[in-house]
Image (cartoon, coloured by chain):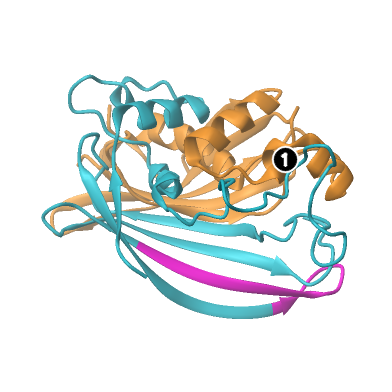
Amino acid sequence: MPLSASKIAVGDTHESIIVEDLKRTQIVQYAGASGDFNPLHTDEPFATIAAGNPSTFAHGMLTMGMTGKMLTDWVGADRVTLYGGRFTAQVWPGDTLSAVATVEAIREENGEHFVDLTISTTNQDGREVFAGRASARIDA
Amino acid sequence: MAAERFPIEQGHVMMFARAIGDYNPVYFAEEGAIAPPTFVIADMHFDPESGLRPHPDRQWHGSGKEPTSRPPEGSGGGGGGGMGLHAEETFEIRRPVRVGEVLTKTTLPGETWEREGRRGGKLHFSETLHEYRDESGELVVIARMVGVRTERNPDA
């Protein structure tokens, strides 16, 4: 159900928990689906002993993908026209992430309506792990 | 770089949607399924030279008998493990990617820049643009990737 320009306002937010207690298996699932088998994400002995990290950690794109579910659940999977952001901190197995979209602008272009959003994903300690933005086509 | 063929396959989209925890039926439909907004990143399966998976004729640095087969010197430590880290990604989506179509990817170099890291050592950023076009040549998605490499152990 797409959003309507007449039913949202600048400052409106939509928030959801995108993952609770992230499992290593999901990181491996993402490696398989995306094709990014970097052992930093998939191989605990490599990540810890060889690379000196506390454990494996999630692909930034997994965080972005999970955050995208919050976005598409709100605006509609076929309505996204722009989605991007920066990976600002690592995401570890066991993390619980929450994502929020905030309406920055509602605009009309060539008779079509769009919403511009800022997006922020934070972990259980309140640290931002993904700082993004998105735009979507909405109804009038 | 030559254009790469990227067929959008039902099983691939299904696995990708599951991996991001998104069971929206629009990604699983028998007819008319679309792909999640970030799906084009999975085109690396179709890159014959992708360095992010093992190849039969090359050494892979992941653990086997030892935690790594890579020599200890160099950029082994910290976040990137020598492969670099993904700093930013942006998708400009002209229309949803559709299961069953074949996209063609063209890669264009972007800008490069440097800055000092928080714990010292230079951070090298490089931008790459990927254009995905459909069979009629129409632009479907433009992906802008920023990667970062460090000279010393980073903290992220």
- Give the residue type at disc 1: Phe
Question: Where does the image place residue A86, in percent across and percent down from the top left?
Answer: 58, 56
Q: Residue extending furthest left?
A: B136
Magenta region: B115-130
Image chain in cyan:
B
**Relative side of A107 to B113, left or right:** left
Residue B115 drawn above or below residue A47: below
Residue B72 drawn above or below residue B68: below
Q: Secondary structure at mark 1?
A: loop
- Does B117 lie within the magenta span? yes
Q: Residue extending furthest front?
A: B57
Q: Quadrant of the C terminus of chain B?
A: bottom right
- Does B128 lie within the magenta span? yes
Question: Where does the image place residue B148, in percent across and percent down from the top left?
Answer: 65, 66
Q: Hue of chain A?
A: orange
Nearest to the observer: residue A1 or residue A97: A97
Q: Residue at x 56, y 39 (%)?
A: A62
Image quadrant where residue B2 sits: bottom left
Q: Which residue is mark 1?
A: A57
**Relative side of B152 to A72, left or right:** right
Question: Where does the image place residue B41, in percent across and percent down from the top left?
Answer: 44, 48
Asked whether residue A104 appears in the rendered view, the answer is no
Asked whether residue A133 appears in the rendered view, the answer is yes
Q: Main secondary structure of the magenta part?
A: strand
Q: Residue at x 53, y 47 (%)?
A: A119
Q: Residue at x 32, y 34 (%)?
A: A77
Q: Chain of mark 1?
A: A
Nearest to the observer: residue B118 or residue A10: B118
Question: Where does the image place residue B42, in percent across and percent down from the top left?
Answer: 44, 44
Residue A67 drawn above or below residue B135: above
